[in-house]
Amino acid sequence: MENMKTIASIKRNIQDHVGDKVTLKANGGRKKVLINNGIIESAHPSIFVVRLDSEDQRTVSYSYSDVLTKTVQLDFSL
């Protein structure tokens, strides 16, 4: 149970990476996985915002529980 992540540790980790590049893997439903690169723009009490590296500079927001349940996976090793 030691390495099991909690919402608080996920939130701290994301807050430490605000402004950093990230690879985002999100469950798109119907067995689709959406993979995008972006920058963590901001972290709020319940959600965090990622600005995607796309031509329209779209932003997406996710809750920390999405990371906990692995609906969203973040890779900071860019």
Image (cartoon, rainbow, N blue to C red):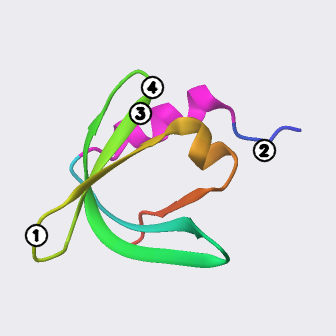
Q: Quick check: is 16 in the magenta stretch?
A: yes
Res 32 → quadrant: bottom right
Give the mark nearer the N terminus: 4 vs 2: 2
Q: Is residue 40 left or right of residue 30?
A: left
Query: Disc 3 to disc 4, how far (Cα)?
Result: 4 Å
The span shown in magenta is 6-18
Query: Disc 1 to disc 3, how far (Cα)?
Result: 22 Å
Identify the residue under disc 3.
47
Identify the residue under disc 4.
46
Res 10 → quadrant: top right
Q: Secondary structure at mark 3?
A: strand
Q: Residues within 10 Å of mark 1 (few under 14, many from 20)?
A: few
Identify the residue under disc 2.
3
Q: Nearer the viewer, mark 1 or mark 3?
A: 1
Q: In front: 52, or 19?
A: 52
Disc 4 residue type (three-letter)? Ser
